[in-house]
Image: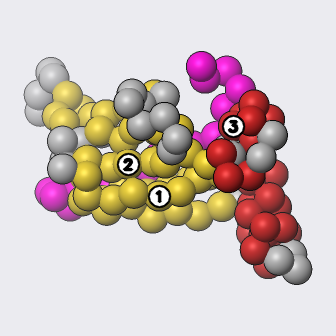
Amino acid sequence: PICSIQWIYSLTEAGKYGNRTQAYRLLTLGADGRVLVWVWHKLGTPVYGYQLLWRAPQLESKILWGGTCMAFARAANASHAAGAAKSKREAGAAAAAGGAANFMVGTEGGRIFRCFYDANDLSVK
């Protein structure tokens, strides 16, 4: 099941479709340990994703951790620009202009993962 979901402004989608209603992607965190990125108006297949894997010091293999929550923070210059914006639309554009977004993922076992999402993900098809 999906444990957490977050709307993310995507400069790639904004450039592709030319309107702000289709300029967002969804980030989902699953209890199965997968973080997936979706184009919100095409939810058939995720655009890309990754797994929450951690190498245990005593084991040769990696452990897949199930996610429970995620929290986002923007770069200091983007959040400052967003705070100075006059409207919600300007705030979203200012935050997206910062590019990469850091976010933290918490797991059932107490492990915390630092993750990244790039709003300028032009290389991703």
Asked if residue 86 is positioned above or below residue 16 in the image, the reply reads below
Query: Which residue position holds label 1?
Result: 6
Start-end of magenta stretch: 107-125
* Amino acid type for the residue under numbered disc 3: Glu
User: Along the polypeptide, which appears first: circle 2 or circle 1?
Assistant: 1
* Amino acid type for the residue under numbered disc 1: Gln
- Report the disc number at residue 17: none
Provide residue 93's location: percent of width, then percent of height. 80, 58
Residue at x 81% of width, y 51% of height: 97
The reply, left or right, for residue 63 in relation to residue 49 is left
Mark 1 Cα shell of 10 Å, populated few (<14), some (14-19), many (≥20): some
Provide residue 4's location: percent of width, then percent of height. 33, 59
Residue at x 18% of width, y 50% of height: 1
Query: Which residue position holds label 3?
Result: 13
Mark 1 falls on what kind of element? strand
Asked if residue 28 is positioned above or below residue 109 in the image, the reply reads above
Q: Quadrant of residue 69?
A: bottom left
The CA distance from mark 1 to mark 3 is 16 Å
Q: Nearer the viewer, residue 108 or 27?
A: 27
Mark 2 falls on what kind of element? strand
The reply, left or right, for residue 42 in relation to residue 11 is left
Count of numbered marks: 3
Residue 17 makes an appearance in the image: yes
